[in-house]
Image (cartoon, rainbow, N blue to C red):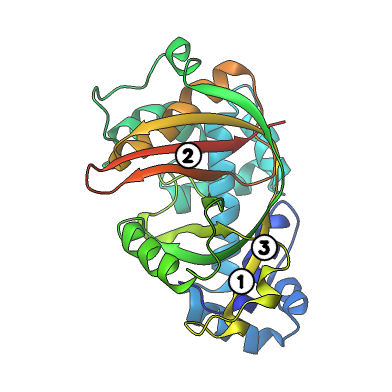
């Protein structure tokens, strides 16, 4: 878990400006610390240098666009993130271990072959079937308290238990629970996924509540940006969520003609039955 709110805000800054020519100096200046002090703080929290983190995120976002924007050329996508055709191919090969062309050509098959892909049939669903499960909806902004994690999803259930116990004084009967996601696990390294577990709160709740389980200065609050979303109404076991996402990314998004915008997606937890391992979750992908 990322305990430093300074590092968490720096990650937000990087994600927001990832298509720009930002570097270590820019992120340190935004955070209000010297380059050397901030760099040590960032690496201690994330396990990566600021430079390596920016480079990784930028290439992974390019890879995600190659996957979901099949109608666009590799050159056009790389230019969006500040690369020339030649230096993009070299860096992509270094980090993803194949050229952008072969990555795009084989990503659907690799998504299905991924160890997280647990479906009744080990294939992607047809577009017509997905249209019965996916709707386009508009959501408001949500004020949340959250914990940010960098790692894998294997301990997610345990992380949720700790989070809900820590912030139980904030929870109301109508409060929604969210997981905000920043990566496609079929592209990002399993141990490098960035995700937030979140609870909806009233805007003034943080200032007015006393909660002895945590230090108030460590409390992280933010906004999940609303707007237009493609919503997959998932019903099933938690092991099948990855497959649902891959059906959206590999089939529904490309075939629907929808374009993913620069907001980040989130899951809304509707029903969780731990004993039966059954869940109803809205998987929300921001679209234009």
From this view, report whether residue 250 is shown above or below residue 183: above
Q: Is residue 80 left or right of residue 249?
A: right
Looking at the rendered image, the disc whose residue lies closer to the viewer, 2 or 1, is 1
Q: Secondary structure at mark 1?
A: strand
Q: Residues within 10 Å of mark 3 (few under 14, many from 20)?
A: some
Q: Quadrant of residue 236?
A: top left
The residue at 59%/17% (across/down) is 256
| Residue to which mark 3 is pinned | 222
For the residues labelled 2 and 1, the Cα–Cα distance comes to 39 Å
Image spot of residue 200 (x, y percent): 60, 56
**Residue contact at pointers 1 and 3, CB within 8 angstroms:** yes
For the residues labelled 1 and 3, the Cα–Cα distance comes to 7 Å
Image spot of residue 135 (x, y percent): 57, 23
Image spot of residue 277 (x, y percent): 25, 43
Q: Secondary structure at mark 3?
A: strand
| Residue to which mark 1 is pinned | 220
Q: Earlier in the sequence, mark 3 or mark 2?
A: 2
Looking at the rendered image, the disc whose residue lies closer to the viewer, 3 or 2, is 3
Nearer to us in this view, 130 or 213: 213
| Residue to which mark 2 is pinned | 99
**Residue contact at pointers 2 and 1, CB within 8 angstroms:** no
Q: Is residue 179 visible?
A: no
Q: Secondary structure at mark 2?
A: loop
From this view, report whether residue 202 is shown above or below residue 39: above
| Quarter of the image that includes the C terminus | top right
Image spot of residue 168 (x, y percent): 47, 68
Q: Earlier in the sequence, mark 2 or mark 1?
A: 2
């Amino acid at each position: 878990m990322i305990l430093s709110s300074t590092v968490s805000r720096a990650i937000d800054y990087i994600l927001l400006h990832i298509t720009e020519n930002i570097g270590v100096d820019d992120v340190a200046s935004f955070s209000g610390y010297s380059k050397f002090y901030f760099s040590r703080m960032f690496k201690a929290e994330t396990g990566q240098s600021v430079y390596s983190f920016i480079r990784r995120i930028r290439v992974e976002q390019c890879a995600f666009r190659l996957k979901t924007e099949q109608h666009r050329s590799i050159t056009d996508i790389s230019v969006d993130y500040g690369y020339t055709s030649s230096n993009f191919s070299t860096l992509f090969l270094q980090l993803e271990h194949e050229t952008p062309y072969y990555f795009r050509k084989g990503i659907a098959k690799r998504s299905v072959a991924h160890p997280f892909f647990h479906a009744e049939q080990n294939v992607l669903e047809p577009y017509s079937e997905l249209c019965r499960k996916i709707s386009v909806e508009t959501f408001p902004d949500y004020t949340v308290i959250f914990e940010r994690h960098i790692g894998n999803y294997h301990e997610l259930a345990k992380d949720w238990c700790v989070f809900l116990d820590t912030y139980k004084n904030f929870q109301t009967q109508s409060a929604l629970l969210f997981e905000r996601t920043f990566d496609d696990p079929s592209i990002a390294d399993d141990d490098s996924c960035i995700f937030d577990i979140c609870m909806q709160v009233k805007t003034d709740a943080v200032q007015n509540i006393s909660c002895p389980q945590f230090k108030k200065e460590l409390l992280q609050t933010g906004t999940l940006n609303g707007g237009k979303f493609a919503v997959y109404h998932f019903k099933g076991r938690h092991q099948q969520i990855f497959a649902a996402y891959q059906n959206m990314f590999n089939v529904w998004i490309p075939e629907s003609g929808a374009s993913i915008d620069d907001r980040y997606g989130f899951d809304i937890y509707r029903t969780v039955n731990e004993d039966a391992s059954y869940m109803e979750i809205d998987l929300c992908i921001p679209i234009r």
